Image (spheres, grey):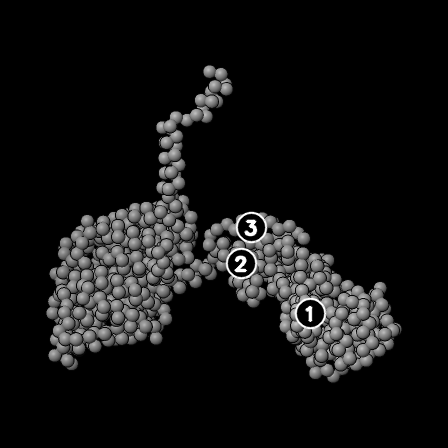
Amino acid sequence: MDKTGENKEKRTLSPLLRRLLRLKVWVVEHLRLSERQVTLIWAALIGVLGALASESFRKTSDFLHYLATGSESGIITSFVKLPWWQRLAVPTAGGLLAGLTLWLGNRLFASVRQKTTTDYMEAIVVGSGIISVRASLVKSLSALFSISTGTSIGREGPLVQLSSLAASLVGRLRRFPIPQRRHLVACGAAAGIASAYNAPIAASFFVAEIILGTVVVESLGPLILASVVAAFVSQVLHGGEPLYKSPGFNLHTRWEMIPLSCVGVVLGFVAPAYLRFLRTAERLFSKVEIPIPLKLAVGGAFVGALAILNPDVCGNGQGLLRSLFHQNWFWDEILAILLLKLVATAAAFGSGVVGGVFTPTLFIGAAIGMLYGQTVLYVAPDLRSDPAMYGIVGMGSFIAATTGAPLMAILMGFELTLDYAIAPFLMVNCVVAYYCSGIFERRFMYGESLERKGAAFFNQQLAEVSIRDLVRLDPITLPKNATFAQIAETFVQHRFQHIYIVDKEKRLLGAVSLHDVKTFLDRPELESVVIAADIMNEDFPCVSPRQGMSEALHKFSEANSERLPVVDDLNSQRLIGSISKTDIILHLAGEKSGSGTSRQFGKV
Amino acid sequence: MKLPFPVPRIWYKKGDRYGGYLVISRKSVEQLRAAIFIGNLEAKSEREAILKMLGALQGHPQVKDLSELSAATFDRQQSDPPLFPGGIAFPHARTNSVSSLVMVVATCPKAIRFSDMLVRLIFLIGVPKNAGADYLEMISFLARHMREDQVIDRLVKAEDLPSFLTAFADGP
């Protein structure tokens, strides 16, 4: 076949091939996965990984608990069997080991911790979505020692940490951009909470409401998927029963709705005191200048000493909550264990034990709710109130009031008990408690931590970035006798809001603002009469490369401008370039601005 | 397009030209009304003319420091003195020695040389640094009104401020 014939044969496709080609085009066009769909797939995988990480932590914790106490039972049951000296020794030794782990980890991986974060909240909100593997493992190991030896701290903290770490690793391996990495870590956190509490809806809202601060479908979708998958895997591994199954409640009389609707008010006013109590404990421990291992050992010893009086203080309070809802407790018993648990949790939290306070807070809320219920029963016996019902409502209300996340608290209360009859009361009281708490307290449990981390991260980033790194050289300038026509022409040619006015030695004299002259740009009569010196702002702020970025940001707020002139020295005022807000924001977000000293601007 | 009904020559509204009539800023009109008028100003030089006009501002409630205003005005005259075709000069200063826009209007039937132009009308303006827009508005307002030689002739003939304003309002 000659050359022409070959070409003809190539041009004519067989009907089958044409159909296949059409099919391929259709598939490519219609089934092409967007970034959002890809995120969903990864969210599901992270759900599986999160549940497996949580399960591994649980199993390891149970094994260490067996080694420490010689018992395979739950923490409280094990401690009941122990002699008094062992009740004291086990949490103390656990604290010591946990502290030693942290101390060693700090020494070995200090450089790693400076570059990346170990905190999942920080990684999601202000970080780059990268969580340090080694430092996270150190924290988790430390938490294992504390939790398995009965310290009064929640294990949801390390569960979420490990799950988030798994998500962070996926993001790093796949080299996702920062926003997607952060979103995946958020999915990991949601998966960790879902597998810890078997509460997928509340878990996704926990992350959305508390950490992301937004409940929009874009971010909530992957969180829900990751949570549901994690909860499903956890149910496969150890059953699908709700954590604190409700015994079933009925209102004996409609009048009971009145005291039941006031639970939120009580808990809302108690919550700020609780938060301050925890902060005080933290402050007191921080004043004690002893090595970390000793500090954690002291925290463990506190719990151990209280366990001699009553072993119920040990652990995160999960078993205690079940017992509270299903067994008959007298008011003085509830009050005693409430006070002991408060002190034990504050001692553990204040000493710096790695772990969460979510479950202990659930217990404290439930105990206060039950005490309130007992009071109602005493004052109005005809109502025949069930204090456990007040306990469940109190649990949800207290979480709403301490975390500042009423939506999550409502869902959590419902998912933990799976009792629909109580849902309306939960809803009302969670919202009421949140508002009551807000009267006295603006810094909620996780918000304060996030605020601190956010500010620290932001300050660190600001301290690291130098004006010199972000300055764009050769900004647009005009002499002070430039005519109004030249000024108008320059504004038309460039998209900037300010033109810098300089003298012959390039010293900055001021800036002409587009905002000031825009009304007059179409007035030809001004073209020869007005010059730059007539309309420039002589007090326009400028920065020098020697100044810090925080000073630059302060000046931006003064100037209300996207761009600030940069002079070599504030005395000589010689203009060398300009710095823009966008470049600073991109730099803080970890993106290359494409500027730096790229000298993009032509001189006018 | 001409409007089918009589419209006052000066509309107290900020904007543009409608139907051949000028729509101007109320503020500029008020500032012009508050101006100090000097008729038949005689001076041998630009400097003498400006000094005489500055002298009229002595004791003016809006002038905080006359010497500073004077220095700023002469400083501005050094670079591109603002002159408008037809013999109009706008010596001015942006300085915080005045608390709001002040203006002295002078007619010079005997023209005075400002740089390379013979000037018959002088508008000396002092404006605070933060009121650049007022200055632009005023200059624009004056310049648009005095594009025609016949208007300038009428204005130069005015003997006092009311007659000056009437001549100004009559337009081209």
Q: Position of residue A546 (x, y in %)?
A: 58, 59
Residue A581: give its label: 2
Tag 1, which secondary structure?
A: strand
Number of the label disc, if any, that sits on residue B22:
1
Nearest the viewer among A441 and A426 is A426
Chain letter of the residue carrying label 1: B
Residue A266: percent from left, percent from top: 25, 75
Query: Is residue A259 positioned above or below A467 on the image?
Result: below
The residue under label 3 is: A595
Mark pair 2, 3: CA separation = 12 Å
Mark 1 or mark 2, which is nearer to you?
1
Left or right: residue A464 versus residue B11 is left
Name the kind of residue labelled 3 in the image.
Ser
Can you say whether A38 is above or below A2 in the image? below
Question: Is the Cβ of the residue at disc 1 closer than 8 Å to that at disc 2?
Answer: no
* Both labels 1 and 2 in a single chain: no
Q: Who's the residue at 22% across and 70% down the image?
A: A425
- Looking at the picture, how far across and down is residue A321, in whole percent? 18, 64
Decide which of A332, A252 is in the foreground and name it.
A252
Is the N terminus of chain B in the top left, top right, bottom left or bottom right quadrant?
bottom right
Which residue is located at x 22 percent, y 60 percent? A415
Identity, as a three-letter code, of the amino acid under mark 1 = Leu
Q: Chain of mark 3?
A: A
Callout 2 secondary element: helix
Which secondary structure lies at badge 3? loop
Residue at 78% in and 67% down? B148
On the image, which quarter does residue A320 sit in? bottom left
Taking the image as shown, residue A384 lies to the left or right of residue A550, namely left
User: Is tag 2's residue or tag 3's residue first in the polypeptide sequence?
Assistant: 2
Q: CA distance from mark 1 to mark 3?
A: 48 Å
